[in-house]
Image (cartoon, grey):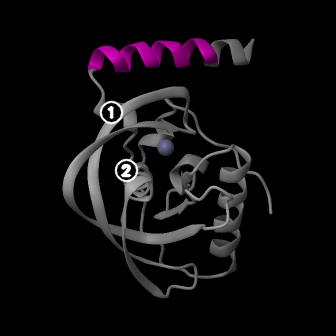
Amino acid sequence: MALLNILHHPDPRLRTKAKPVVEFSAPLAKLADDMLETMYAAPGIGLAATQVNVHRRLIVVDVSENNDNPYVLVNPKLELFGNKVAADEGCLSVPGVYERVERAESINVTAQDVNGEPLAFSADGLLAICIQHECDHLEGKLFVDYLSSLKRNRINKKLRQLAVSDNS
Ligand code: ZN
């Protein structure tokens, strides 16, 4: 396994819309393993392939306390239902920023596993929020897009300053 490089906002590659996964073979399983390792090391609770510059529809999520309940979702599709709930979100591609975002309380998920086998389940709470956040990445969307432009501009400015100090 290997740690992957995570793209940081405002990198334009984060705005790429991911294509469906059509080939279920060893490289896909390796990518999923590497994404899980990268997510756990960060540490984070979710990672989309988009964030590691692979523009295919694959996300990994683990909201468990002990990092022992990973979800690997290929070509995920979501059906949203229930009330809107607001929770603080962060993102490995937007380091140091935590802001309140509204999402659907509950979701039905259909997807495939790394072998192409279909899977379906329902989720609510943090798992539902995290999966919605990761699926947004596959559309080239970031959680900061839900914020007011004032807040977003402040965040962009802060991240640009961080990027400048990284390079110096
Ligand atoms: Zn994210």
- In the image, what residue type sits under mark 1? Asp
Task: Tell me which numbered mark, 2 or 1, is placed earlier along the sequence.
Answer: 2
- Residue 97 % position (x, y): 50, 26
- In the image, what residue type sits under mark 2? Asp
Query: Looking at the image, how many numbered discs can be counted on the residues?
Result: 2
State the image quarter where residue 79 is shown.
bottom left
**Residue count near mark 1 (Cα–Cα under 10 Å), binned few <14, some 14–19, many ≥20:** few
Queried on whether the Cβ of the residue with tag 1 lies below 8 angstroms from ligand 1, the answer reads no
- Residue on which disc 2 sits: 136
| In this view, 131 is above or below 73 | above
Quadrant, the C terminus: top right
Quadrant, the N terminus: bottom right
**Alpha carbons under labels 2 and 1: distance apart:** 10 Å
Secondary structure at numbered mark 2: helix
Judge from the rendering whether residue 66 lies leftward or rightward of residue 121; answer left or right: right
Q: Residue at x 69, y 79 (%)?
A: 26
Are the residues at dot 2 and dot 1 in contact (C-beta closer than 8 Å)?
yes
Secondary structure at numbered mark 1: helix
- Residue 59 % position (x, y): 51, 61
- Residue 96 % position (x, y): 57, 25
The overriding secondary structure of the stretch rendered in magenta is helix
Specify start and end residues of the magenta stretch as a single range.
Answer: 149-162
| In this view, 99 is above or below 60 | above
State the image quarter where residue 31 is shown.
bottom right
Queried on whether the Cβ of the residue with tag 2 lies below 8 angstroms from ligand 1, the answer reads yes
Q: Residue at x 59, y 59 (%)?
A: 64
- Residue on which disc 1 sits: 145
Magenta stretch: residue 154 in it? yes
- Residue 166 % position (x, y): 71, 18
| In this view, 150 is above or below 88 | above
